[in-house]
Image: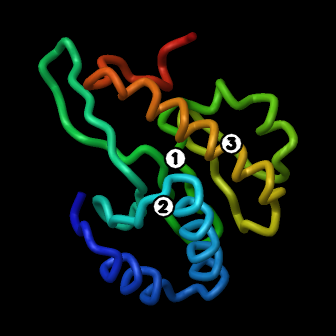
Amino acid sequence: MTAPDASAVDEYVASIADEQTAEDSRMLIAMMRRVSGHEPTLWNVGTIGFDTYHYRYDSGREGDGHVIGFYPRKGKTTIYLMDGTARHAELLAKLGTHTETGYCVYLKRLSDVDPTILEQIVRESYDYVKAKSQDGPIRQILWKVED
């Protein structure tokens, strides 16, 4: 995490040159704030995350990650589902125009997808990661693990 205060997020969103990407970012912030009950934080170079979980792998690597988040870019905003896209295949099929990889959903514009479905996916992902982290650090990469 690089900036734990919401003003850094506001400044970052205000600096986005593409107005559509900035507006999509504001809408995603409002939705993820509703889902998580947390304020946004700025992670790395431009990722906006909500809430945290701790991980500790058998390799000794450990740290903190955002539970839900996104990275706004013109024409390809990334939504991070830390539990992976495979768990949400049925809903993703109904989402609208997007592409996906292991734990990322890529959107050209928020208007290309059904916002109700997107919020349901984000909520289910958030709830799953939070449940997995209740008993201490998460010990596996959730999006690579089959349930």
Image height of 86 relative to 44, above or below:
above
Is label 2 in contact with label 1 (beta carbons under 8 Å)? yes
Q: Residue at x 43, y 44 (%)?
A: 67
Assign a secondary structure to mark 1: strand
Image height of 37 relative to 81, above or below:
below
Residue 57 % position (x, y): 23, 19
Between residue 61 and residue 125, name the one nearer to us.
125
User: Where, quadrant-wise, is the C terminus in this rendering?
Assistant: top right
Residue 80: numbered disc: 1
Q: Residue at x 31, y 60 (%)?
A: 43
Residue 71: numbered disc: 2
**Which residue in the protein does label 3 denote?**
121
Image height of 100 relative to 96, above or below:
above
Q: CA distance from mark 3 to mark 2?
A: 17 Å
Q: CA distance from mark 2 to mark 1?
A: 8 Å
Residue 109 % position (x, y): 72, 68
User: Where, quadrant-wise, is the N terminus in this rendering?
Assistant: bottom left
Q: Residue at x 48, y 61 (%)?
A: 71
Assign a secondary structure to mark 3: helix
Q: Nearer the viewer, mark 3 or mark 1?
A: 3
Image quarter of residue 87: top right
